[in-house]
Amino acid sequence: QVQLMESGGGLGQAGGSLRLSCAASGSIFSINTMGWYRQAPGKQRELVAIQSTGGTTNYADSVKGRFTISRDNAKKMTYLQMNSLKPEDTAVYYCNTLAKITPSSSWRNYWGQGTQVTVSS
């Protein structure tokens, strides 16, 4: 199986910065995309940023120009640098990866437990 462990959440101030990290571990044959989603209270989980193995990125409009996703393929890690934080960025942030555990297995989505990010005004 694949485990994802997030770190780096916490309390930030409006206009400030936070950096999230996520490490993938376990029986991993190959990783495709790695990304971040978030879920605010009373809202559905939404895509924040996602990155392919080759480096192609996609961002939610609400975070473009403020957040940057990056990854270290050798370490099986992804990062989310969050700048110019806003109170509306407050949410639980989840790491996500599309991976397979054997050459013949299907690609599956895996999720971390989530890390709370709270931005005060």
Image: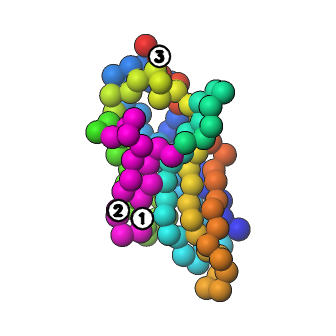
Residue 39 location (% of width, % of height): 60, 36
The image's mark for residue 120 is: 3
Q: State which quadrant residue 64 falls in.
A: top left
The answer to whether one can see residue 111 in this image is yes
Quarter in which the N terminus is drawn: bottom right
Q: CA distance from mark 2 to mark 3?
A: 32 Å
In contact (CB < 8 Å): disc 2 and disc 1: yes
The span shown in magenta is: 47-64
In the image, residue 7 sits, relative to residue 101, either above or below, namely: above
The residue singled out by tag 2 in the image is 56
Q: Amino acid at mark 2?
A: Thr
The image's mark for residue 84 is: none
Q: Residue at x 47, y 16 (%)?
A: 120
Residue 47 location (% of width, % of height): 51, 46
Q: How many marks?
A: 3
Q: Amino acid at mark 1?
A: Ser
Q: Is residue 91 left or right of residue 67?
A: right
Q: Residue at x 64, y 54 (%)?
A: 111
Residue nearest the observer in this picture, 21 or 46: 46
The image's mark for residue 52 is: 1
Q: Which residue, as the protein is rendered here, is positioned at the far left? A: 65
